[in-house]
Image (cartoon, grey):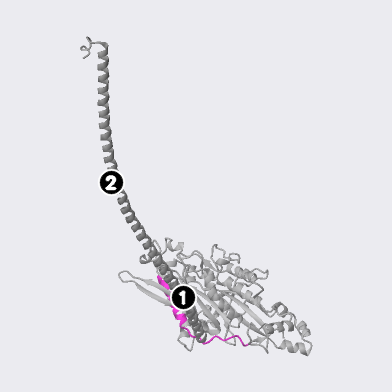
Amino acid sequence: QYQGLAGRSTSEILQLYSAHGQQQKLQRSSVVNQLHGAIKKRLKQDLKSLRSFALELSKDFQRQSKTYLYRVLTAVQGIQLQNEAMQMFQIKAFDLEQSLQEVTERYEKEKQKRRALHNSLVELRGNIRVHCRIRPLLPFDTAAGHSISEDRQRNFPEKVAYAADDETVLVKCSRPGHASIHKTFQFERVYNALETQDIVFADVAPLLTSLLDGYNVCIMAYGQTGSGKTYTMLRPQLEENFAFSIEDESELGIIPRATQEVFRLLSEKTPGSYWVEVSVVEVYNNEIFDLLAKDSYGKVFGVKRDVVTNREGKSDVPLLTHETVENASEFLHLVNKGLQLRVRHPTLVHAHSSRSHLVVTLTITTITSGDNFGASWEDEQTSQRLNKEVSCTFPQKMKENKSTSSSRASSPAQLEATEKLKQVKTRLQLVDLAGSECVGMSGVTGAALRETSHINRSLSALADVLGAIAEQRSHVPYRNSKLTHLLQDSLGGDAKLLVMLCISPDQKYLTESMQSLGFGTRARQVQRGQVKKKNCPVPSKAK
């Protein structure tokens, strides 16, 4: 083309260029228009597709929203129903708790009434109250080296005695080749291994009120060696030389607690209208020893005494030492002195086994007038009048010479007032019996074997006495043992008697525990007649 233009003129060439440029512009315009139309068409299609997709998406979103909203509403309704049900359950639970509380209160009231009626029946019949305390398993229960038969040996303790409730002991008895048998024993009170000294004493304390109301009281701990008698009556024995104080009150046993309670009750009475004496005796190898007797140098040492029956038919220990005390600390100090002399020997069952029966006696002598004798200890007006009439009534004052006494009562009015004074003695006996033993288990020999023989014989004599009383025999063998002779008045019905059974829960001691439970069961059956109040005063030494 360019070659064809070579021979032409410039004007022609310019015309050709102009025509060619217009033609190209037309072609480009056509292409642009076509492209614009295609793009516009495509955009319309895409927009339509987007609108359709957006519509479907909106519809799907609405469907899902409705579904989720339904689920939420259903869940909310379910939660509301659950809340309503929970509220109903809470109301029902509250009603049940109230009903249970009411039933429990009624049960406790009926239980108290039943106990009160039972206690009244015990009072009328003169029955012996029997409580049972089950000690916890202790480290020495697993100690090796016990000389016991193979069928009773075991490397770990097995608990077979339980407190089913506060009045029932459950014992699992089993023999090789035989099905186990559950035996139950009923007592006035049963303490499990977790119940404290406070709980035990709370059931003993009411007897101390009876003491101040004019009744003799005897509390006796019975059980095998290592069953917890000394712990219950005194406190834990941590050292070879036994001692206790009133500092660690949570561990104190019945004897120190009873002493504190007696002096607390006495502190509410008129000063000068009473005095308190203490004696400490042990029965060792069927002999009675006075643990408060002193030599010429004032040193305390055990002196052998004898027990006799006086003209009134009561047991008495002539020359027995009675120390006057004015508070619980003095009392415990004297008891501590006596305890240092108590015989103890180690056995395979217990490292500090007591080899004697311990009898601690607290005697309250009350000065009262003949006109008002027989009134309750709570009659403060009588006590106040007596305090005005007689300013000095303690034993130290009573022991003054006769000339001083006669000079005080020189006038007829003074003599008449003095002659009206009477002494009333009430006695609290606290007895920690030596533990019954199986010779094969304790592994004792020689002198210790002789001690064990005397202990078992005296406990057997105690069981014989209770059996004779229960069967109402004409003869009761009190004199078969010094122990029963010493405790004759308390056993025979002259005192309110509480026996505290102490047993081990371990299978190893099942035979001994069953023997103790059997003793307690027989003791509960004893009917001694109603215990009489001390209303026969002896003439006062102040006369």
Q: Nearer the viewer, mark 2 or mark 1?
A: 2
x then y, percent, for residue 76: 38, 60
x then y, percent, for residue 498: 52, 78
Amino acid of disc 2: Ser
Q: Quadrant of the N terminus?
A: top left
- The residue pinned by badge 2 equals 52
Rounded to the nearest angstrom, the CA distance separating label 2 from label 1 is 75 Å
Q: If you read the primary sequence from the N terminus, does the residue marked by circle 2 or circle 1 appear first?
A: 2
x then y, percent, for residue 176: 32, 69
Q: Residues within 10 Å of mark 2 (few under 14, many from 20)?
A: few
Amino acid of disc 1: Thr
| Viewer-nearest residue: 66 or 184 | 66
- The residue pinned by badge 1 equals 104
Magenta-span inclusion, residue 330: no
Magenta-span inclusion, residue 518: yes
Quadrant of res 401: bottom right
In this view, the residue farthest toward the top is 7
| Viewer-nearest residue: 226 or 383 | 383
